[in-house]
Amino acid sequence: MTTDIRLAFDHPEARAEASAPADPRDRISLRDHVVAVEIGAFQAERGHTQRVRFNVVVEVRPHPLPLEDDVDRILSYDRITDAISVELKAERLNLLETLAERIAERILLEPQAMRAFVRVEKLDRGPGALGVEIVRTRAAQPLRAVDAEGVETAVHPIVVFLDNASIDAPDLSGQLDALQQDGLPVILCVGLPTLALPETGHRAVQRRINLLAIEQNAWRLAARDPRCVVVSSRTEIDWAMKQGQMIVWAPSKLVLDSTDSPDGLAQDGVSLALWLAEHVAAARLVLPSGACVPPGSHIPKVYRDT
């Protein structure tokens, strides 16, 4: 508990360090950046500026080498302060939560940015600082598509977990037809097959074996309907969604390459499907009736009979 409290009130850099994997990314930070701004939902906050403090940490991709001491090869601190300035000038906001979300989203548009910790605090509303802190990942940014008028919009797919009974069901094609009725991209996820798997007693090795077994099940599903295309990376998912393809997710690459993937033996296909739904900012997660879902997610869930 003491550590949790310390992290809650420490600089976001401490939170980034505490949640980093064994091989952490590089980080850049902005500390105690104070701006006078009009913000707030209360009448007393309208027509007056107040001091707002920003603390930001951004985890970045490895820098391209050689750096050659060239500022264009890195994510500059100016990009962080620019993101704050642009969002403050865009419109008057009521909520710090909205401001933090927009700043994080703008920072994550930078090619090098992978994860952003944003803390925003009001300094003049009482004897202490009142604020919010959020963490957002590049992975959670939705796919952007451009319509016929050239307007950019966010695309939020449906993520569906199919158990083995659904994969083997005689009416599988009808189930897939129903999932496509809303016109949203569909990403199908599966769990472990019913066949017995090797037991190694080695956690990291067993995780990979289980992930590969799930991928075998994904290919088994894809063989049952020609619409299904097996993909593994975020880039492949984005491309397949743009093409309107029905996606079957092979999880190994995305799970093993991500720093925030489920830290288990990949035995729970529902947990993996929920993580992917968060990863692609899904519109909803569709699950078999009675499926047990880990707590804490804000992704809407829909249950259906198999």
Image (tube, helix red, strand yellow):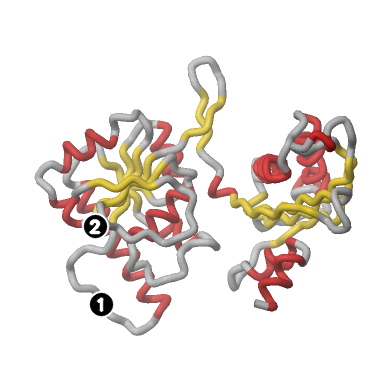
Label drawn at residue 99 = none
Residue sticking out furthest to the front: 43
Upstream in sequence: badge 1 or badge 2? 1
Name the foreground residue: 170 vs 206. 170
The answer to whether residue 70 of the structure is visible from this angle is no
Q: Which residue is located at x 85 percent, y 49 percent?
A: 125
Q: Which residue is located at x 70 percent, y 54 percent?
A: 133
Residue sticking out furthest to the left: 170
The residue wearing badge 1 is 198
Residue 31 lies, with reference to residue 14, above or below; the image says above
**Picture quadrant of residue 228:** top left
Circles 1 and 2: CB atoms closer than 8 Å: no
In terms of secondary structure, where does tag 2 sit? helix
Residue sticking out furthest to the bottom: 201
Q: Position of residue 180 (x, y in %)?
A: 29, 33
Q: Position of residue 202 (x, y in %)?
A: 38, 82
Mark 2: amino acid:
Asn
Q: Is residue 12 left or right of residue 205?
A: right
Name the foreground residue: 91 vs 44. 44
The residue wearing badge 2 is 217
Mark 1: amino acid:
Pro
Q: Position of residue 247 (x, y in %)?
A: 33, 42
**Picture quadrant of residue 196:** bottom left
Image quadrant holding the N terminus, namely bottom right
Q: Which residue is located at x 78 percent, y 43 percent?
A: 79
The answer to whether residue 144 of the structure is visible from this angle is yes
Residue 254 lies, with reference to residue 205, above or below; the image says above
Q: Position of residue 123 (x, y in %)?
A: 87, 51
Q: Residues within 10 Å of mark 2 (few under 14, many from 20)?
A: many
Alpha carbon distance from label 1 to label 2 = 16 Å
